[in-house]
Every structure is written in structure tokens, then in C-alpha cells.
Amino acid sequence: MTAFAHPPLRQASHAVSAEEWAVRVDLAAFYRLAALYGWDDLIATHISARVPGPAHHFLINPFGLMFDEVTASSLVKVDLDGRLVGENAYGINYAGFVIHSAIHAARPDALFIAHFHSPDGMAVSAHAEGLLPLNQRALTVIPSLSYHDYEGIALELDERERLVADLGETNFMLLRNHGTLALGRTAGAAWGRIYQLESACTAQVRTLSIGRENVLIAPKEAQDAVRRQVGRKRLPVEGGRDIHELIWEASLRKAARLSPGFDA
């Protein structure tokens, strides 16, 4: 029996609120997009979302489904103490609970959190110099990038304190010898950021393949300019809508075309 065998939550007797259902659909689409871009890892790694409302619950993938199988109804609801809320055919990845519960508890703005084990992300996480200022994508990430040293598989609850301390107020993280992480107030913000980080890692791996001595580091003045430009106000000619909102709407259309059914 799979998670697809039960009726969608919005049709079941224990239907969730409209607000929670909207978050579930966005999160399920996020999983499908990650699979489309090749950032899934069998049934490992995780993306989570805070459930709207006063109870501090979050949603995460059922431990047993591939990313391209995740649906809005199959997502698992859990509290900050690691207790499942409601029924589900699957449990959750405990390492995912440790990482995501820590950040959801400490960062009210972390409504969506993505953590991947992509080959390029793992490669850069293990690079002594970390993410280098090699290209425009990396330069937009570095001002809000933090690092957390590897302590083993994230199964120990006391690691949460150190993880949160290392994260601080940043929006991107490289978990050393492990992978990538990004967060945001919306699905679009988190998706746009993890896309930036993963793309920057891929570009670095490709760039360093030509040899470290042949690499051109961006000039310091240009790095400083990008730091200023990232926070600038958009010009009227660029339109008034939030860029993360635009990215997410376009990404949802892609998910609907290439991986339909996530909203079930």
C-alpha cells in the first residue's frame, strides 16, 4: 500500500484547512521540481514547510517515497518534539527531523527549508575554501552563506544548537562534507535560493576542473558591488511583483507540465 491509496486530505473526513492545503501543494511541487532538476537522493534528503496556525507543526516527506512520488496528501505532519500529527502510512527520516526542527524552531522566517545531497553540492561542501567568488551566481549567495562542520549523520539532538548558531541570520548554508541548505519565507524564496546555491556549486565544480591556477576570482570591487546590488530596490521598468513570486509561478507551471499529480 502506498501513500496514494488513501483519499486526498481535502476530500477526507479529517480534511485540513485551506491554508494548510495550499502549503502542502507548494511543498509537494517543490519535491517534484527538485527531482526534475536531479537534486533528489533516492528516499533521502528533505524539504519542509511550516504549517500555518498557532501549533508549531511542520510538513516533511514520508520516508519511503521518491521525490517524484510525493503528493500534497502524502506529506507527513510532525511537531517539534518529533511526534507525528495525524495518520500516515510512512514515518519520517529522523536526520531530517533533527535538521529541520532546529531551524523551524529558531527562525520564524524559515517557513520553507530545503536540504539536498547533490553531487556538486557535496563536492563544494567538502572543498577547503568553500564556495568561491568565481561567478555572478556565487557572488549573490556568498553574502548570506554560512557553514556547519560535519559531526556525523544528524541523529543527535544536541547538534541542533550548534547548527542554529552556525546558521545565524543567513539564508544559505553548506553543511561540510554533507550537502546544501537554503530557506525562505515562501516556497518561491526557498526554491530560488536553493537553485542559486546548487547552480553556484555546479559552476564551481566545472570551473575548478580546469585547474585552480587557471581560475579567475572576481575582483574585490565587483564582489562589493554585487553585495550592494542584491539588496537594491527594483526599477519600475522591472515590474512591481516580487521576483520570488514570479519564479515560483513559473516553476509551478513547469511542475504541472512535467510532473503532474503533486496536488492530489
Image (cartoon, rainbow, N blue to C red):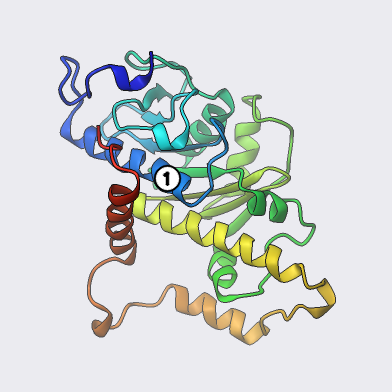
Q: Mark 1 points at which residue?
A: 110
> Where is the C terminus found, in terms of image quarters?
top left
Query: Which residue lies at the image location 53% right of the left edge and 78% below the top edge?
Result: 226
Q: Quick check: 7 above or below 36? A: above
234 displayed left or right of 182: left
70 on left or right of 253: right
- Residue 150 shows in the view: yes
Q: In this view, does 162 lie above or below 1?
A: below
Q: Tag count in the figure?
A: 1
Residue under the point 32% across and 78% down: 234
> Would you say 32 lies left or right of 215 here?
left
Classify mark 1: residues with Cα within 10 Å, few (<14), some (14-19) or many (20+).
many
Which amino acid type corresponds to the residue marked 1 in the rendered image?
A: Ala
Q: Position of residue 202 (x, y in %)?
A: 62, 61
> 166 or 140: which is nearer to us?
140
Outermost residue on the right side: it is: 213
Image coordinates of residue 80 in percent, x first then y, are 45, 25
User: To which quarter of the image does residue 96 belong?
Assistant: top right
User: Which residue: 47% across, 32% down?
Assistant: 66
Residue toward you, 83 or 14: 14
> Could you tell me if residue 108 is visible in this image?
no
Residue at image position (56%, 32%) is 44
> Which image quadrant is residue 225 in?
bottom right
Is the N terminus in the top left, top right, bottom left or bottom right quadrant?
top left
Image position of 57 with respect to 224: above or below: above
Provide residue 209's location: percent of width, then percent of height. 76, 67
**Helix, strand or loop status at disc 1:** loop
